Amino acid sequence: FVVYSITLLAFGIVLLGQRVYAQNDIVSGVKAAMEVGNARALVRHFNTIVELDIKSDRALYNKIQAEGKLRDFFKEQPPLEFMIIHSGSGGQGLEYVIANYTSVNGDAFRCYFLIKNIGGRDVIDQFQISQ
């Protein structure tokens, strides 16, 4: 029984570690994409359908539509800086990240995204950019 319990605990720690690694991979991927205004790299981390809210224009989009909306945003507001200021868990396996985005135009935005595990894969389910 003790060996079984230790094996089960070790397996759980390995799975948890893999999930944390996947989420960190998403966060670093988003940061890299936002720093250079790369919409295509950003949507690689999105769910098949994502809730996207850019400056109060909120809707559900597939990845191709979301990429177009983000590309338009980056053309209008090219990146100067993207800084993650807070992250945490919201329960039920959800993780969230809050960041500040500053454009070369001097405009400041707050970014928020929600990471959700769907079908054993961590993806961004909601992405918001607000002023």
Image: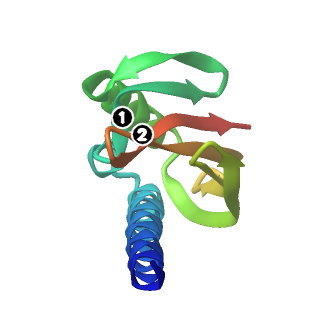
Quadrant location, the N terminus: bottom left
Is residue 76 among what the camera can see? Answer: yes
Quadrant the C terminus occupies: top right
Element at label 2: helix
Q: Secondary structure at mark 1?
A: strand
Q: How many marks?
A: 2
Callout 2 crowding tier (Cα within 10 Å): few <14, some 14–19, many ≥20: few
Q: Nearer the viewer, residue 59 or 7?
A: 7
| 31 relative position to 106: left or right | left
Query: Which one is nearer the viewer's eye here, 57 or 59?
Result: 59
Q: Would residue 107 be visible to someone looking at this image?
A: no
| Place of residue 54 in the rendered image (x, y in percent of width and height, measured from the top left) | 58, 29
Look at mark 2 in the image and give the residue it sits on: 75
Q: At 42% from the left edge and 72% from the top edge, which residue is drawn?
A: 8
Residue lying furthest front: 1
Q: Amino acid at mark 1?
A: Asn
Give the residue at x 25% y 26%.
64
2 or 1: mark nearer the eye: 1
Q: Tell me residue 130's x, y (percent).
A: 69, 35
Q: Amino acid at mark 2?
A: Lys
Numbered tag placed on residue 47 in the rendering: 1
Structural distance between the alpha carbons of marks 2 and 1? 23 Å
97 vs 18, left or right, is: right
The image shows residue 64, relative to residue 12, as above or below, that is above
**Residue 41, how many percent across, how many down?**
29, 51
Label at residue 10: none
User: Mark 1 packing: few (<14 Cα in 10 Å), some, or many (20+)?
Assistant: many
Q: What residue is shown at x 59% (from left), y 53% (from top)?
A: 103
Q: Residue at x 44, y 57 (%)?
A: 30
Position of 62 with respect to 112 (left or right) is left
Q: Is residue 78 above or below residue 17?
A: above
Give how far across and how far down residue 99 sits, in percent: 66, 57
